[in-house]
Amino acid sequence: MKLNYYLYYAGQLKRQDQSLVYLYEQKKVYIPINQIDILFIFGHIDVNQNVIKLLNEYDVMIFYFTYSGQFIGKYMPVQKHTGDQIIKHAYFVNDDRKRFLVAKEIIMGSIKNMMFIVNIIERNNVLMSNAKSILISL
């Protein structure tokens, strides 16, 4: 089972063989790469290119926050597409019937989400019956 790791102290994240080493306050913490699902980094931590390559290889995401917890940004590994996937996608896009079905499902999902929000607002005693009837007629 992969785990989420939270790194709070300022320091460095380095690659050593097939694992990560978190260096902070003259301490070393070894983190096996195959046990990481997501890294949450708070504060200032140096990360080099070798660490990024390793994280990309094992599909590990990084989320960066300030020390106080404000979201700064994220790193998402590159998604690997095979040629077969791209060819199947192209065939699917070229078929009008299949493309219409996908568009219909997207629109139906949007309508369901709108209905859910309208129901929440109705529960809060806000009159939305007009909007609900319009959505139902779609």
Image (cartoon, grey):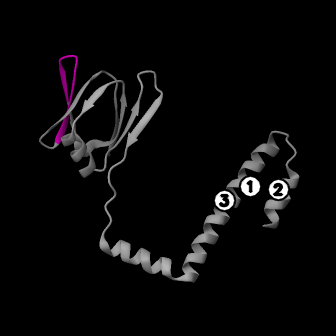
Assess whether mark 2 and mark 1 are in contact (beta carbons under 8 angstroms).
yes
The label shown at residue 115 is: 1
The 10 Å Cα crowd at callout 3, few under 14, some 14 to 19, many 20 or more, is: few
- What residue do we see at 27% from left, 43% from top? 35
Q: Position of residue 134 (x, y in %)?
A: 83, 60
Residue 25, above or below 90 = above
Residue behind mark 2: 132
Q: Earlier in the sequence, mark 2 or mark 3?
A: 3
Judge from the rendering whether residue 107 lies leftward or rightward of residue 138; answer left or right: left
C-alpha distance separating marks 1 and 2:
7 Å
Check disc 3 and give the amino acid type: Ser
**Horizontal and vertical percent position of residue 78:** 32, 54
* Mark 2 residue element: helix
Distance, label 2 to label 3, CA atoms, is 14 Å
Q: Is residue 111 left or right of residue 81?
A: right
How would you classify the magenta stretch by its main secondary structure? strand
**Residue located 43% across and 74% down the image:** 89
Q: Is residue 52 magenta?
A: no
Q: How many marks?
A: 3
Report the residue marked by disc 3.
110
Please give the range of residues in magenta: 19-29
Q: Quadrant of residue 106?
A: bottom right
